[in-house]
Amino acid sequence: MSSRPDSTVVDRQYGSALSGNADDAAAMLVGAVKRYGFGQSAVVALDDVTIGFPAGKFTAVMGPSGSGKSTMMHCAAGLDQLTSGRAFVGNTDLSALDDRELTRLRRERIGFVFQAFNLVATLTAEENICLPLTLSGRRPNAAVLDEVVSLLRLGDRMHHRPTELSGGQQQRVAVARALVAQPQVVFADEPTGNLDTRSGQEILGFLRSAVDRHHQSIVMVTHDPNAAAWADHVVFVVDGRVHDVIDHPSADSVIDVMKGLGR
Ligand SMILES: Nc1ncnc2c1ncn2[C@@H]1O[C@H](COP(=O)(O)OP(=O)(O)OP(=O)(O)O)[C@@H](O)[C@H]1O
């Protein structure tokens, strides 16, 4: 397994996104290139990206449609393979893992929240929440499960199946599933995209408190400046490159950067 690069090298290139130290990154891309297709029809979705997602922080990823946000997230989370460069979760170089090891790493060290909830229809809320742990032969820590369920106000919904839950409740189950295994990093792809404003705000509040109360590391792709304003940092991706990073964002400061992109 190759080691992560020297933090000074990474600092020089990535600045504030790393909170000053590469060793503090929950996940990191180094010289990441992702090319789809070949020859004339090739698309470079990630163009030599190096970025660290700080541990214990909430990072939003924004950018115009087609700029490479989902590709960045999928490659950082080991859902897709880089064409070249390296992706790390903690100190683990994903390129050094075979398929089985990668599946295990995703199950045990990463939490996922998707726009479409992605719950298993035949399982209850409780079974869905515990699924990543069950699949890896672990049992949930009862205290953590209780805390997550109470944080997400799911106590009276644990025996319901997804079709018996509202969209907001389904996404709360998905967030609980992502948090209960206390993963090294949670990747959320447009987690509020299918929700009304109130349910969306609730989900963002839960993600925020998982960071503030439990030092969870979260990376969230979003199109919504109001959602990005819940984060500690916003990374702006344009044409497969990191264009800018802002700390302590507000909806207005995010909108200003987006306007500057002219899109
Ligand atoms: N499987 C694929 N095959 C070919 N091209 C792809 C594939 N996936 C993504 N792309 C291309 O890569 C580029 C980046 O796509 P990506 O989905 O990462 O962008 P995005 O910023 O997440 O977009 P959006 O905000 O619209 O979801 C786009 O030009 C897209 O068309």
Image (cartoon, grey):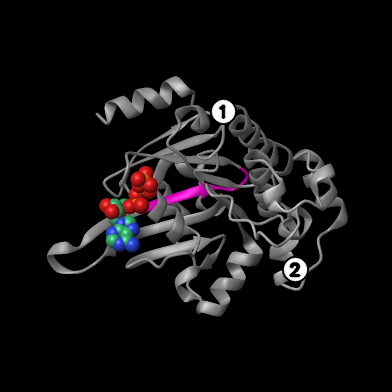
- Residue range corresponding to the magenta coloring: 50-56
Of 159 and 93, nearer the camera is 159
| Residue 127 part of the magenta-drawn span | no
Residue 47 seen: no
Q: Which residue is mark 1?
A: 197
State how many labels appear: 2
Q: Amino acid at mark 2?
A: Thr
Of 198 and 85, nearer the camera is 198
Residue under the point 52% across and 32% down: 227
Residue under the point 51% across and 44% down: 220
- Secondary element at image label 2: helix
Q: Is mark 2 within 8 Å of ligand 1?
A: no
Can you give x and y, in whole percent of width and height, for residue 173 in the image? 70, 48
Q: Residue furthest top?
A: 252
Can you give x and y, in whole percent of width and height, for residue 229 in the image? 52, 28
- Specify few, some or many for label 2: CA neighbours under 10 Å numbering under 14, 14-19, or 20 or more: some
Q: Which residue is mark 2?
A: 134
Q: Residue furthest left?
A: 40
**Does 134 sit left or right of 9 as displayed?**
right
Q: Amino acid at mark 1?
A: Thr
- Secondary element at image label 1: helix
Main SS class of the magenta portion in the image: strand
Label pair 1/2, CB-CB below 8 angstroms: no
Of 120 and 57, nearer the camera is 120
- Specify few, some or many for label 1: CA neighbours under 10 Å numbering under 14, 14-19, or 20 or more: few
